[in-house]
Image (spheres, rainbow, N blue to C red):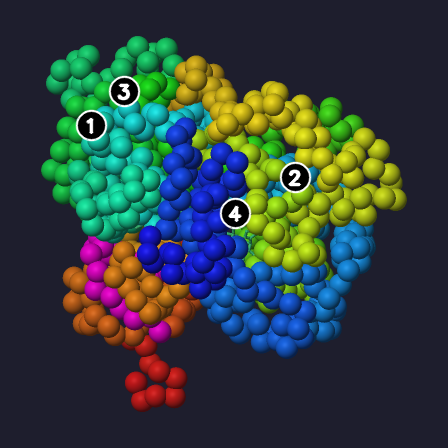
Amino acid sequence: MAHSLAMSYAQMGVKRTLLTLVQVNQKHGFDCPGCAWPEGRHRSPAEFCENGAKAVAEEATLRRVTRDFFAEHSVTELAGRSDYWLGQQGRLTEPMYKPSGSDHYEPVAWDEAFSIIARELRALESPDEALFYTSGRTSNEAAFLYQLMVRRFGTNNLPDCSNMCHESSGSALTQTLGIGKGTVSLDDLYKADLIFVVGQNPGTNHPRMLSALEKAKGNGARIVAVNPLPEAGLMRFKNPQKASGVAGRGTKLADRFLQIRLNGDMALFQALSKLMLEAEDADPGSVIDHEFVETHTHGFHDFEKNVRELEWEDVEEATGLPRAAVEETVQDVLGAKSVIVCWAMGLTQHKNSVATIREVVNFLLLRGNVGRPGAGVCPVRGHSNVQGDRTMGIYEKPSAAFLDALRDEFGFEPPRRHGADAVESIRALRDGQAKVFIAMGGNFVSATPDTAVTEAAMRQARLTVQVSTKLNRSHAVAGEQALILPTLGRTEKDGDRFVTVEDSMGMVHASRGRLAPASPDLLSEVAIVSRLAMRLFDQDGVAGIPWERFEADHDAIRDRIERVVPGFDDFNARVREPGGFTLPNAPRDERRFPTDTGKANFTANALDVLRLAPGRLLLQTVRSHDQYNTTIYGMDDRYRGVHNGRRVVFVNPGDLAERGIADGELVDLVSEWPDGERTAEAFRVIAYSTARGCCAAYFPETNVLVPLDSTADTSNTPTSKSVVVRLERHVAAGGAG
Ligand SMILES: Nc1nc2c(c(=O)[nH]1)N[C@H]1C(S)=C(S)[C@@H](COP(=O)(O)OP(=O)(O)OC[C@H]3O[C@@H](n4cnc5c(=O)[nH]c(N)nc54)[C@H](O)[C@@H]3O)O[C@H]1N2
Ligand SMILES: Nc1nc2c(c(=O)[nH]1)N[C@H]1C(S)=C(S)[C@@H](COP(=O)(O)OP(=O)(O)OC[C@H]3O[C@@H](n4cnc5c(=O)[nH]c(N)nc54)[C@H](O)[C@@H]3O)O[C@H]1N2
Ligand SMILES: [Mo]
């Protein structure tokens, strides 16, 4: 805790820091903007964590970006600054406009800003020439109004950060279980006998999850960590306050650590299933939950045939694990009555991610480990309301049922044609098919792959609009005209109004900011959408959609959400109850699987082993302990022992020796793709424990290496965790080498 407090004092001042932190995730406070991990029923005053504190400090900072700042710094100059420097400048304070041909932002009145956007949107030949991005901090209320405005305008171009995040989970789970979300609650975690934590670094990214895992362990659960890196938070854990996790010291957390190769998880879960089938052969009736399989599932035989044919050589090559390690893990599984699999980006950002997650489902279905206490799937979400935004209709491929409900409620015919996701949006900008780009939060330019391609695409736009709390690269890499619309953050007071969010386990609760806004000129996201909609639609009337009322009265928005989105009955009353309420979840609550077959679907997935050409490594792009996605808090990564620098690459000592490269040397990372090579220069090599043939470096610095067209099958998520690279000795510019 000492570390994060020092950081927040520097940003906020002592009194404000304490006042703010005490209100995080409290019943009458605001939802922590840090991550989507749920709060639990008994919130203690210390229910915040080191990295939650950093996220809050970033937003509650006392530093300000004013009109003088923009007069001093040209857009070109800002584009040359690092993400870290940009983020350190503080909170945005008033709307700014960069006119066509100018290299400076200048102040603009809110009214004028909305007029500019409305003018450019109306000038388009088709509504599909506009793109409306959302990052996952947007409240349910703002998200609902935003998608309503966008669909009323006439497009489903609603890309969001999910496209780069848990889209693969959504795709796989919708097909197999009938719901694109997890099926466990915190209580399930506490009841589980065995918990897999796969492709996730909770010590940094979901620190409060460590307390939950510790409690589960206290109740007798075993924990299996599957990761190419021995992440500090997974291996050992110390819980000084029984509430906030500190990784790296203390007691042992993972009972078993499978140091898997990148992208090896599909083979691992297939192998586990295969061994379970063989154990069933040896002792019929002892392994498989036949009653569950027969009553509740579909497709068992195709699945069974596929995994029985699995070759051990392929498994060993893909996973890098000895067969014995997999066999021992199956013993853990057979000894457990209830099993949960948790995962995050280590599973979702590969070409075969959707198939991999389908294999996780197969593995759980075999023993009926879905829809009963202590068992199920647990995709751990990132942004604090990314799951809620989807529930509210932020989705480029909305279901017919959702659009019908929208039509019936608001009396217009929403567009039916599917819209562009994040990668397709970049292509549309690049190819001149999209001309206006609007972002409700986030930092699209830095978060997306293929930085050079993306930046060039963005600069071609006729207008880019960023609704933001803080300065970031997407303000500097802007369209011909650009607008910055500063908005209230979670921590800030919006009159007596509150908003709502949904956590990673489908709990909906209120979030009420308490701090004075960073500037008197900020508008809430709800107000920004409502006022833009009023301007945009004023010529053809706003009949049926009371935007003005929505801005003033969030209960009025929630009444509409209740009538459009299933599960929000009595929304306004229930969200005022302490702790909020849980959304219905058919697989979890009733063992009902609303898929195309009406059952939980086993699937057969052909294993493709990623084979690299000689000399190549597979690169994963990860978060350090001192960043929140593209917001860089500092230059250290304490848990991995890195200080004062982010341009580092973690490589197995054996792979270094093979290449004759020493720890500490500078290398260039060169990624290879059919359309050419991409280079990220001057990374310091760190000899590190990672699976052979794999390496790791931080994003967003390495996004330049991820080819735009390298995406996951079905979900179209950029393959940020499997980029084929080679290391080349760095030659200093102008130096003799
Ligand atoms: N402090 C902080 N909190 C955050 C964020 C942040 O940036 N900072 N970001 C938020 C967001 S949006 C998200 S989505 C989450 C992200 O949370 P994580 O998914 O934990 O984040 P990453 O840093 O991408 O870490 C990926 C993990 O998966 C492992 N991994 C990579 N590839 C593979 C693989 O092929 N197989 C296996 N088994 N493991 C693999 C990596 O070694 C690493 O431990 O965190 C959220 N919370
Ligand atoms: N190579 C690589 N790329 C990745 C990933 C990876 O693992 N590797 N991870 C991907 C993942 S999982 C994700 S989720 C995306 C993240 O993509 P984004 O969500 O687009 O990026 P963030 O960095 O979270 O956005 C930070 C900005 O959001 C704004 N902001 C913060 N709070 C608020 C708010 O309350 N309201 C509004 N309007 N704005 C706010 C601030 O201006 C801040 O600068 O990145 C993806 N990109
Ligand atoms: Mo994410």
Please state which amino acid type lies under the numbered disc 4. Cys
- Is ligand 2 closer than 8 angstroms to the Cβ of mark 4? yes
Residue 3's tag is none
Q: Is label 1 or label 4 in front?
A: 1
* Distance in Å between CA atoms under marks 4 and 2: 29 Å
Asked if residue 178 can be seen in this view, the reply is: yes
Q: Answer whether labels 4 and 2 touch (C-beta < 8 Å).
A: no
- Give whichever of 262, 466 is nearer the camera: 466
Q: Which residue is mark 2?
A: 496
Give the percent coordinates (x, y) of residue 735. 34, 88
* Distance in Å between CA atoms under marks 1 and 4: 36 Å
Q: Which residue is mark 1?
A: 220
Residue 367's tag is 3
Q: Answer whether labels 1 and 3 touch (C-beta < 8 Å).
A: no
Q: Is label 2 or label 1 in front?
A: 2
Please state which amino acid type lies under the numbered disc 3. Arg
Residue 161's tag is 4
Q: Answer whether labels 3 and 2 touch (C-beta < 8 Å).
A: no
Q: Which residue is painted at 52% across and 59% down in the image?
A: 61
